[in-house]
Image: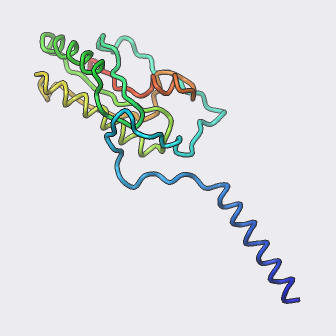
Amino acid sequence: MITSARTWIACALAVSAATACSKSKTAAPTTPPTVAAPTAPDRGGGGREAPASVEAQPDVRPSERAGFGPVYFAFDSALLDAAGRDELAAAADHLGRARARIRVEGHTDDQGTTEYNLALGQQRADAVAAYLRGLGVAAERIDTITYGEERPAAAGVDEDARTRNRRAELVVAP
């Protein structure tokens, strides 16, 4: 009798452990996102997938766009590459003459937790704003905001779509 009770308890513990392991998600990092080099290792998606019932709606507001392309970032990074710096130099030259207010919007792909992506999007927006200030655009003319993964430029979960969603956009403030 004692042996069968122990066997039953052992089986119940094994089933509950297996159930708990199959439902666990990768924990969110406890530290803020790192500003990593483009060769940073992949986090593996943070254990999240887009729900099948919800389709991402591309972010299209052409009337507000500043006329400059987005600045793209490497995975898990807020470092500006040469192409991004060139784009921002052209934007700063135009903004210096136009005196318009600009909003820098930080975006991420769908990998990682919501909190992580909001923080990384803010780091990207802040990096762009700091670079524009360094090029002579007055700080009081620049606002930043993060959207994380909430406003994708491209729908989908393939690498091409994710690459296009890792960006910061310059928007003429209304």
Q: Residue furthest bottom?
A: 2
Please state which of residues 156 and 163 is positioned toward the viewer in this rendering. Answer: 163
How many numbered marks does the figure carry? 0
Q: In the image, what residue occupies the spot 79% across and 72% down?
A: 11
The quadrant of the picture occupied by the C terminus is top left
Asked where in the image residue 129 lies, by quadrant, the reply is: top left
Please state which of residues 151 and 113 is positioned toward the viewer in this rendering. Answer: 113
Image coordinates of residue 39 in percent, x first then y, are: 39, 35
Q: Residue furthest right?
A: 1
Q: In the image, what residue occupies the spot 20% across and 16% down?
A: 89
Apparent side of residue 158 relative to residue 39 in the rendered image (left or right) = right
Asked where in the image residue 47 lies, by quadrant, the reply is: top right
> From what the image shows, is residue 48 above or below residue 13?
above
Please state which of residues 25 and 64 is positioned toward the viewer in this rendering. Answer: 25
The quadrant of the picture occupied by the N terminus is bottom right
Q: Residue furthest front?
A: 39
Please state which of residues 134 and 39 is positioned toward the viewer in this rendering. Answer: 39
> From what the image shows, is residue 136 above or below residue 119?
above
Q: In the image, what residue occupies the spot 34% across and 49% down?
A: 32
Image coordinates of residue 44 in percent, x first then y, are: 53, 42
Apparent side of residue 159 relative to residue 75 in the rendered image (left or right) = right
Asked where in the image residue 165 lies, by quadrant, the reply is: top left
Q: In the image, what residue occupies the spot 16% across and 12% down?
A: 93
Image coordinates of residue 137 in percent, x first then y, are: 13, 22
